Image (cartoon, rainbow, N blue to C red):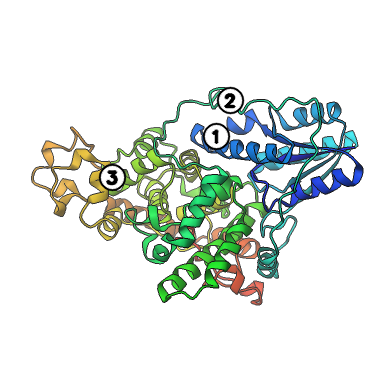
Amino acid sequence: MNVLIWFKRDLRIHDHAALALAADMARDMGGAVLPLFIAEPEVWAANTASARQWAGMADALGDLRDDLGGLGAPLVIRVGAAVEVLSRLTKRAKITHIVSHMETGCEASFARDRAVAAWARRAGVSWQELPQSGVRRGFRGRAGWAMARDAYVATDLVPAPQALRAVQGIEAGPIPSASALRMGLDPCPHRQNAGRVAGLAVMDSFFAVRGVAYAGGISSPLLAERACARISPHLALGSLSLREVSHGLAAKRAERLPSQWARSLAAFESRLAWRDHFIQKLEDQPNLDNVAMQPASDALGRARDAGRLAAWSAGQTGLPFVDAAMRYLNATGWINFRARAMLTSFATYHLWLDWRDVGAELARKFTDYEPGIHWPQIQMQSGVTGVNIPRIYNPIKQGLDQDPTGRFIRQWLPELSPVPDAHVHAPWRWSGAGQILGRRYPEAVVEPSAAAREAKARLSVLRATPRAKAEEFEVLERHTAPSPRRAPSQTAALPQRKAAPDTGQMVMEF
């Protein structure tokens, strides 16, 4: 009988355990393989989805289709609900077994997978899911988690099948456009290609040349575009596997390297470990896009202010470094993590916007949107985990630290080109501000220092309540790694109950 390999966010043939298993099963049963990707309209109608994300998905699907075609089994693409598509194809193609990788997503993807599992049981179809990272399903607590994660990363890569026997009579179907999925226009002129060919090129360039500047360049928006690995879209869509990247890192480390390279590779390795650590949080609690780790935080009463949200989203808050970062993100679909943290902090503290609205707005902009990183980080930067020290970034200081001459600001806010360097971070302090503010560039929507003080005062009141203190312990028990000062791979032996708050803020640059 035949085997269906269901691709989701694992769009490659290399180091693909599920594809290898499907090929072996089909060969042993004397059957054929049907590779399938389902474009689910409900998924792409979510408030975290965007046409720029679909464009990256289409890049990866195109490369995957080429690679599978070379093996003899073209990628089949269908649009529809997963259960309906799988039900039709399994009957038509005489499928007895489905194989896929596990996917960690929010409640919607978990609900989809539960529905597929229930259908498969009713239909008598075997569905087997395999892990594709260090994230583990059904795992309680963090004792032993890091050792298991590191053991997985160190295992050998799974070679691609040499050939596949295709199921006959099944039309491949086109890769749908964003408009076909009823997604609105979403211009992103400098979007990064997310296909595998581009992913291999960017990974190779990082380990060959660019990576030496990683440790020193990841914080600056001027340097990070080149210093960061830029593999995040490829990891999010699975056009590269985490294990491939880890093995590439190990190969580079085996060379005789100067100290600057060694520091950068150590920093990069720790961030790869933190990546799985954060995705595990969503695996353990898939409602993190809607429910705060510390539910008492909802008493903060943050605003659902559409006007302020729109100004922030468009880069029109009147705070130059914030606006430049947002306009850069709008144009590229990516920005370094320090800027992501600052954008979140400014929106949820200075503008006092609800973290759910802020998180959804940023998710749509990110072409490397990974729910398991995104939502725990949004909650951390918004102060709703209960266990992380609130970081209220001063947007003026951030600009002075990371863009002292205003070069980045002027590149993305050309309307501020007449403002002298000494005032470009706070143009309202310039004697000629009246020529620009309120005309070519908006006046600041808030006074940063006053807004920060008010936010800190509200947080202090909340954190002192008995409910908040009780929930803090629950979060520590459920989500934190045993040590706050090391990557999970370095802390496996420490006892769970001595856990302290994560310090994984500011460490997710890729």
Classify residue 213 as left or right of residue 69: left
Amino acid type, label 2: Leu
Q: Give me the disc on residue 446.
A: 3
Image side of residue 472 versus residue 448, left or right: right
Residue 510 in sight? no
Q: Give percent across and percent down for residue 110.
A: 70, 43
Q: Amino acid at mark 1?
A: Trp
Question: Along the line of sight, which residue is nearer the eye, 483 or 224?
Answer: 224
Residue located beneath label 2 in the image: 181
Q: Residues within 10 Å of mark 3 (few under 14, many from 20)?
A: some
- Residue at 15 percent of width and 52 percent of height: 421
The front one of 508 and 34 is 34
- Viewer-proximal residue among 195 and 101: 195
Q: Residue at x 78, y 41 (%)?
A: 164
Q: Which mark is residue 492?
A: none
The kind of residue tagged 3 is: Val
Instruction: Determine whether, in the image, residue 482 is placed left or right of residue 398.
Output: right
In this rendering, position of residue 482 left or right of residue 224:
right
Q: Under tag 2, what secondary structure?
A: loop
Closer to the camera in the image, 331 or 43:
331
Q: Which mark is residue 54?
A: 1
Mark yes or no: residue 357 visible.
Answer: yes
The image quarter in which residue 249 lies: bottom right
Report the Cα–Cα distance between label 3 and label 2.
39 Å
